[in-house]
Amino acid sequence: MAWNSSVIMQMGRFLLLVILYLPREMTSSVLTVNGKTENYILDTTPGSQVSLICAVQNHTREEELLWYREEGRVDLKSGNKINSSSVCVSSISENDNGISFTCRLGRDPSVSISVALNVIFPPLLSGNDFQTVEEGSNVKLVCSVKANPQAQMMWYKNSSLLDLEKSHHQIQQTSESFQLSITKVEKSDNGTYSCTAKSSLQTESLDFHLIVKDKTVSVPAEPIIAACVVIFLTLCFGLIARRKKIMELCMKDKDPHRETAL
């Protein structure tokens, strides 16, 4: 009986330990950023500053945290790594749009949470605003554009919506440019073209001044070179042919005058 009591007591202690400690060991750590438990998008504007605070929830020991900007690791001070860690993103610009910051658990990188920056700004336009081309040549007006949200793009000519001619005009648009190509430029293409971007924030426009000059008549270089070669060879052959005559004249000039005997 004493042996049975001892076994029962040991089993009871074991079960008590299981009850007390097993839930703790099975509970997984959870990361939060600014109180959110899932990846999210943070709206911001150029020139602003945001703070991201990552914390470990349900941890049973001290946990080291790591921060990444895209794929690059962020340097953290020694006191800014355990159980809670923060990063400050200052002087935000348009180029930071879409950049993600990820907080990871040091011992298990698969436990992570990310924040993507959504930098909201009106359209920004740039490009070569003066171009001079010859009549009959081809020209491209490239309007570089950045905008968030995305802007609606249009081309105007002399303040009127450009009337596109299928065989004469071509428009190409990417996420960062709005291009107008004109094939075989004519005098009538001369004027001011406006690249216009319209977003929910505001409308921006950039002027491109196209100057079409008369086509210059160019003389082919090959015939001129060939003519010069022919002239040069003709002179050389002429000098060679007359070499004997020239030598006789030179010798005659060098001989003393002969006196005729009486």
Image: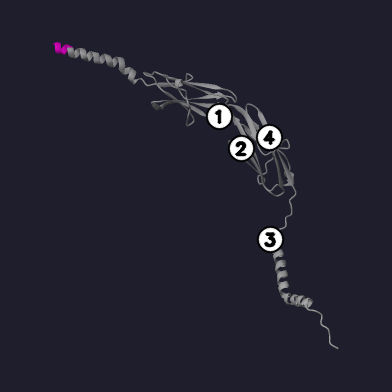
- Badge 2 vs badge 4, beta-carbon distance below 8 Å: no
* Secondary-structure class at tag 2: strand
- Of residues 151 and 255, which is closer to you in this image? 255
- Badge 1 vs badge 3, beta-carbon distance below 8 Å: no
Task: Read off the residue under disc 3.
Answer: 222
Please state if 55 lies on the left or on the right of 161 as rendered.
left
Residue furthest toward the right?
A: 262
- Of residues 22 and 167, which is closer to you in this image? 22
Q: Quick one: label 4 or label 1, which is nearer the N terminus?
A: 1
Visible residue check, residue 55:
no
Q: CA distance from mark 4 to mark 1?
A: 24 Å
Other-residue count near label 4 (Cα within 10 Å), few / some / many at <14 / 14–19 / ≥20? some
Task: Read off the residue under disc 1.
Answer: 96
**Three-letter amino acid code of the residue under disc 1:** Asp
Tell me if residue 18 comes above or below residue 124 in the rendering: above
* Secondary-structure class at tag 4: strand
- Of residues 203 and 144, which is closer to you in this image? 144
**Three-letter amino acid code of the residue under disc 3:** Glu
Q: Quick one: label 3 or label 2, which is nearer the N terminus?
A: 2
Q: Quick one: label 2 or label 4, which is nearer the N terminus?
A: 2
**Three-letter amino acid code of the residue under disc 2:** Ser
Quarter of image, res 146: top right
Visible residue check, residue 211:
yes
**Three-letter amino acid code of the residue under disc 4:** Leu
